[in-house]
Amino acid sequence: MITAMVVSFVVLAVASVPVAVGLGVAVFIAVCFFSPFPLVGIAQRMVTGIDSFVLVSIPFFMLTGRLMNEGGITDRLFDFARALVGPIRGGLAHANVLASMIFAGMSGSAVADAGGLGMVEIKAMADQGYRKEFAAAVTVASSTIGPIIPPSIPMVIYGAMAEVSVGRLFLGGIVPGVLMGLALMALIYFWTFREYMPKDDRYSLHRLWTTLRVAFLPLLTPVILLGGIVSGIFTPTEAAAVAAMYAFGLSFFVYRTVRLKDIPGIMVQTLVTTAVVTFIISTTSGFSWLLIVGKIGQVLVEFVTSVTSSPAVVLLIVNIALLILGCLMEAGVLLILLTPLLVPIMTALQVDLVHFGVVMVLNLMIGVATPPVGMCLFVVSQAAEIKLETLMREVIPQIIPLIAVLFLITYLPDLVLAVPRWLMPVR
Amino acid sequence: MSERLRRVSDKIDAVTRFVAVPIGIATVLIVFFEVLMRYVFRAPLITSVELARLGFVWSCFLGAALGVKRGSHIRFAFFLDRCGPRGGALLRLGVSLLCTAFFGFLVLQGVEMTQRVYETFFPALGYSQLWLYLPLPVSAAVMVIHGVAFVAADLATLRSAGVGDGTR
């Protein structure tokens, strides 16, 4: 049954059938021809698979990112980041990374970063004399920080599927996200010795103050989000709704950059991008159900533990496999497909599931920047009108510091777990 | 024929947008007002979680139908890109047919599931669970209409390019 399902899915995926439909058809074939279960079970699983209050936060986080982009709030964040680090060697490249780190505290998606803020960053860098290809590559690499620093849509998906606290996952992403930003900034700094990169004039406290004042209200978003979750005022889903309403309030009432007539368009885009993810989750839940019934998780655990009982070795193998798969498949699809398979193995090896969740999400986010199937690569290459092949070549060196951070957090779990242990201890 | 089906598909898409956008907005507002009611008015809404879940499930399935119309669902196109014009057109037609058949299957199974849960209720809302399962057959029916329009368009492309009759 499982073989039939996996083979059908692979054949359909190769034949360019949409992933969600391919999964659904594969489940149909397995249930119809190789199992005693009724077909109506597929429909039931498709609904119950997304009937989760945790997942409700996905469209809210997407809406927040879109409102911030449409409302010109990202421009303000970039100006503030530029005032902070612009005068350093490679100033605007650093500002690009820093702005992505700040935006990551408001939006949970790498594509929202690359597609919205990224365009502001590339234009500013190209205007100042940076090579457009380099500017685009920094944008692609820094967009991967978006889903690591909380909030994070992939962490919501992982949390819902692995039944792990989304709040603790969010907190676990803070240090790795900051490390990713610092690692990219270090690479940029050393790169300035190889290639000329302009920088802004000397520091201006006046400019810093002016840009801070303009960006102050959007900068409160991460404070509201994380403060609310950590203090127990609201759940991650409620925090997402508050953030969406806050972003709406800023762009509609304060900055007046979004008008009422823009709302339906923004909402349709939000619903479609949400549904692209949730439709896969929906059809995958039938897939996961059959995997559980077929005791695949158990078989995998027995196989892995018979080969090695060392979590370090397993994490190494899983990381390498995910990095390779991340180059070939879309990150969200991999996350949804592999979480139910990998979580039982990690549980058996006593790997903390918050730690593993952050490692897995960070690993898969590197995939959105790596050729040939990196979503952010496509978005930036199209929007910035740079040939995909050129951008791919330019991005590769930027991936190295991200992989270094991945292995650092894999083998130093405290880098992930210290903050959640401190702020949201398990009682 | 293909043009007429495309117009029907466009109209259905407009109706889907008309229904989905208010549901999406209402879902955000429900969760937001739950927080407001709890902390500002000290009167938590016991039904808000169930309402939000309902709104979310409807948004997801209607959004999936909007995504089908826009071709937004993720697919791996490497094989399709390597097919020639004839092979590519035929493959696209095959994919459209398979998708439409799958959506048709979801309509049937969704209707059956909806009937099965008709007599069960949400604990706080008291509504029938029918409302939770209904978006699946409804959206799948919309997807079938888009799918049929795609199949007709793919056939028209094949014919107009002379691919189907083997002239290329």
Image (cartoon, helix red, strand yellow):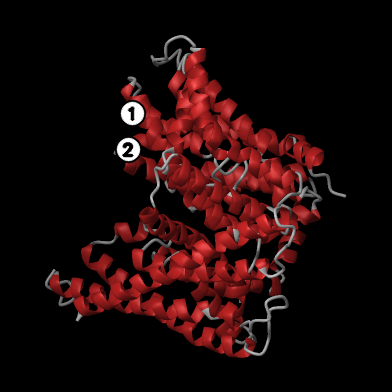
Furthest-right residue in this view: A427
Above or below, comparing residue A185 to residue B72 in the picture: above
Residue occupying the point 56% across, 42% down = A106
Residue occupying the point 38% across, 33% down = A120
Mark 1 or mark 2, which has the lower sequence index? 1
Name the residue that disc number 1 marks: A132
Q: Secondary structure at mark 1?
A: helix
Type of amino acid at the residue the image marks with label 2: Ala
- Give the chain of mark 1: A
Q: Please provide percent x and percent y for residue A100.
A: 51, 34
Proximity of marks 1 and 2: CB atoms separated by less than 8 Å: yes
Furthest-front residue in this view: B41
Give the left or right position of residue A328, taking residue A406 as reference. left
Give the left or right position of residue B56, taking residue A382 as reference. right
Residue occupying the point 45% across, 12% down = A193
Q: Please provide percent x and percent y for residue A251.
A: 45, 44
Q: Nearer the viewer, residue A148 or A66?
A: A66
Type of amino acid at the residue the image marks with label 1: Lys
Residue occupying the point 51% across, 46% down = A249
**Quadrant of the rendered image containing residue B142:** bottom left
Q: Nearer the viewer, residue A301 or A390?
A: A390
Q: Secondary structure at mark 2?
A: loop
Whether residue A195 is visible, yes or no, is: yes
Whether residue A371 is visible, yes or no, is: no
Residue B51 tag number: none
Q: Nearer the viewer, residue A56 or A1?
A: A56
Residue A384 tag number: 2
